[in-house]
Amino acid sequence: MSFTGPSVSGGRTVKRAFEFGRTYVVRPKGKHQATVVWLHGLGDNGSSWSQLLETLPLPNIKWICPTAPTHPITIFGGFPSTALGESCYGVKLMTGTEILLIVMPWGPSEVLMSFESGFDVGELSEDAPEDLEGLDASAAHVANLLSTEPADIKLGVGGFSMGAATALYSATCYALGKYENGNPYPSNLSAVVGLSGWLPCAKTVGNKLERVEEAARRIASLPILLCHGRGDDVVPFKFGEKSSKALTSTGFQDVTFKAYNGLGHYTIPEEMDEVCSWLASKLGLEGCSS
């Protein structure tokens, strides 16, 4: 699946292609009541999350797990990663005094990430420019995956790390009724989950929502669950906490924030149990145990 969007290069407009990888689907074991698109984090893929989600006691959910674009990066020999490619956000990778700027699919601008090759871990930059074109492309890919679901099926989106950021951006698109580029947002979301992530465009979303008459109704009815580890050294805890506060301050009335002592940039059974209970409750699922 690919999406294209305009970008400026050397004073001229060019098309950026967004080539997404394989999508993995976990079929519901019981009555199909909801479909959730789940987005992975840096260097991961849809397969690993689909295997985890299949084990959850949520038999009424169909899970759709796409894989972000893969792009080889030539850094000390180069390696391919599903978190790197000509797709969305800038990442500064620092080694010694050298700083390399690359881009990755669903994730933020100006993130310093940790790799096995020894790059330093830093912090998300709150003042970094957002790649709205890339955000729109990722949110549109999610909406496209949901577009063929039956009308009586409740729709949701969730993710981990960069995937959580795209899930939360999708929530704001739903509330606004449109993408940043002005195209209408087509999906009627019923639940949004973000693990170890953050809210893109947090500083501007409030003003945008105030200008849309229907936004107040949408944000009042959309439940959002955010979970974050206090020991996260990749996406610091404060960004999850600030994202929760930003959503609440802009009018989202059903925001749940769960903090986990000692949890780093990964998930644990306790956290997934919370996700299961929350989804079962908010989506009104039958026959679910927590």
Image (tube, helix red, strand yellow):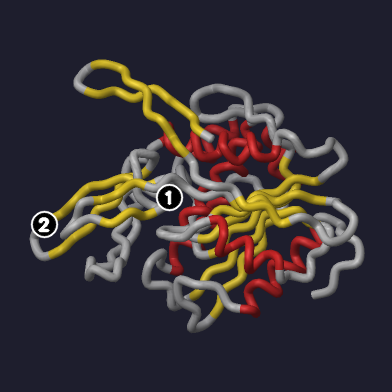
Of residue 145 and residue 270, the one placed in the foreground of this image is 145
Tell me if I can see residue 87 in this picture: yes
Q: Which residue is mark 1?
A: 107
Q: Residue at x 16, y 59 (%)?
A: 76
Q: How many numbered marks have been drawn onto this rendered protein structure?
A: 2
Of residue 31 and residue 265, the one placed in the foreground of this image is 31
Q: Secondary structure at mark 1?
A: loop
Q: Residue at x 28, y 67 (%)?
A: 121
Q: Which residue is mark 2?
A: 98
Name the image quarter holding residue 116. Answer: bottom left
How far is mark 1 from mark 2, CA to CA?
Answer: 22 Å
Looking at the figure, which quarter contains the C terminus?
bottom right
Q: Secondary structure at mark 2?
A: strand
Q: Position of residue 11 (x, y in %)?
A: 22, 17
Q: Amino acid at mark 2?
A: Glu
Left or right: where 286 falls relative to 157: right
Looking at the figure, which quarter contains the N terminus?
top right
Q: Is residue 132 above or below residue 41?
A: above
